[in-house]
Image (cartoon, rainbow, N blue to C red):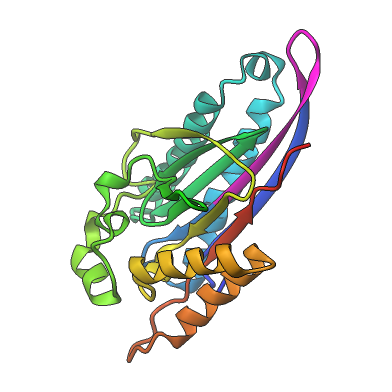
């Protein structure tokens, strides 16, 4: 679901052989990128730069046998974010501007998901009967991700405290690792969604569709989309983007 012209959703996958037994490893890459207050045209450019650079770096690094032999996914994710930050920071210095990108990145391999995050986008893993787990390892640095932001006004009051790619020459990148189970539901959401849907409403919608929906990703997307459209506002706030996935049973 992409209701915002400024956001970019990107998915890529690849299969690599690694290790002594030359066993194939399937990787899935999910990137949700957005831009902070740059306007529709420039915002889409910035978000595309972030998403494409991150995915390219991951694919390039995992193609190297030495990297895949160690399966150092955390290093690969950190390096891809740092590379993207470096490129955008150089752009800002050259043009004397302050364009910032916000990203949530997931990398899946087998029954494991690695996640990293910069900015006000966010991701959750919902496990039926167990509840929600944040996929945002540095969420404590962002009030949005603590559930304190339920509408656009409070989002704007929180304002410029949001961390973004491209503001500094280097940045600290946190990576989180989790095991996946069948029927887990993963949801990535952009900033625009949190301006329109409260965290309480979000949890309720995902829980209901995960328990009673026949097609969980589709039902969840439709519910989030309808909630965003039902949001009443007097301004022209941007739309939001989301990506919903469900883990299938392993044979």
Q: Look at 57% across and 53% down and name the residue there.
A: 185
- Nearest to the observer: residue 131 or residue 147: 131
Compared to residue 211, the image places residue 174 above or below, namely above
Q: Is residue 25 magenta?
A: yes
Q: Look at 28% across and 60% down and name the residue there.
A: 147
Q: Quadrant of the C terminus?
A: top right
- Nearest to the observer: residue 206 or residue 162: 206
146 left or right of 238? Answer: left
Compared to residue 135, the image places residue 64 above or below, namely above
Residues rendered magenta in the picture: 17-31
The part of the image, by quadrant, that contains residue 21 is: top right
- Nearest to the observer: residue 7 or residue 135: 135
Q: Look at 69% across and 68% down and name the residue there.
A: 214
What secondary structure is the magenta-colored segment mainly?
Answer: strand
In the displayed orientation, state which residue is furthest to the left: 157
In the displayed orientation, state which residue is furthest to the top: 20
- Nearest to the observer: residue 140 or residue 5: 140
Q: Position of residue 241 (x, y in %)?
A: 52, 67
Compared to residue 229, the image places residue 89 above or below, namely above
Is any part of residue 136 visible from this angle? yes
Q: Position of residue 138 (x, y in %)?
A: 33, 41
Q: Quadrant of the N terminus?
A: bottom right
Q: Position of residue 218 (x, y in %)?
A: 66, 69
Q: Position of residue 119 (x, y in %)?
A: 36, 52
63 left or right of 224? Answer: right
In the displayed orientation, state which residue is furthest to the bottom: 234
Is any part of residue 1 visible from this angle? no
């Amino acid at each position: 679901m992409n209701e915002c012209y400024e956001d970019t959703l990107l998915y890529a996958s690849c299969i690599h052989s690694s290790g002594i037994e030359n066993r194939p490893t399937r990787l899935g890459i999910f990137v949700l990128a957005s831009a902070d207050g740059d306007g529709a045209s420039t915002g889409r450019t910035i978000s595309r730069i972030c998403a494409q650079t991150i995915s390219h770096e991951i694919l390039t690094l995992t193609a190297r046998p030495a990297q895949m032999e160690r399966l150092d996914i955390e290093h690969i994710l950190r390096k891809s974010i740092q590379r993207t930050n470096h490129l955008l920071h150089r752009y800002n210095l050259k043009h004397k501007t302050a364009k910032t990108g916000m990203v949530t990145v997931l990398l899946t391999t087998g029954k494991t998901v690695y996640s990293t995050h910069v900015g006000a986008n966010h991701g959750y893993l919902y496990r039926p009967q167990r509840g929600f787990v944040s996929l945002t390892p540095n969420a404590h640095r962002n009030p949005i991700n603590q559930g304190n932001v339920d509408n656009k006004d409070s989002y704007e009051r929180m304002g410029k405290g949001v961390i973004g790619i491209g503001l500094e020459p280097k940045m600290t990148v946190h990576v989180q690792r989790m095991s996946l189970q069948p029927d887990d539901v993963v949801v990535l959401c952009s900033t625009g969604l949190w301006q329109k849907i409260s965290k309480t409403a979000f949890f309720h919608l995902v829980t209901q569709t995960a328990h009673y929906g026949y097609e969980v990703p589709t039902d969840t997307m439709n519910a989030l989309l309808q909630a965003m459209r039902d949001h009443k506002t007097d301004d022209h706030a941007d739309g939001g983007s989301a990506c919903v996935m469900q883990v299938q049973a392993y044979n």
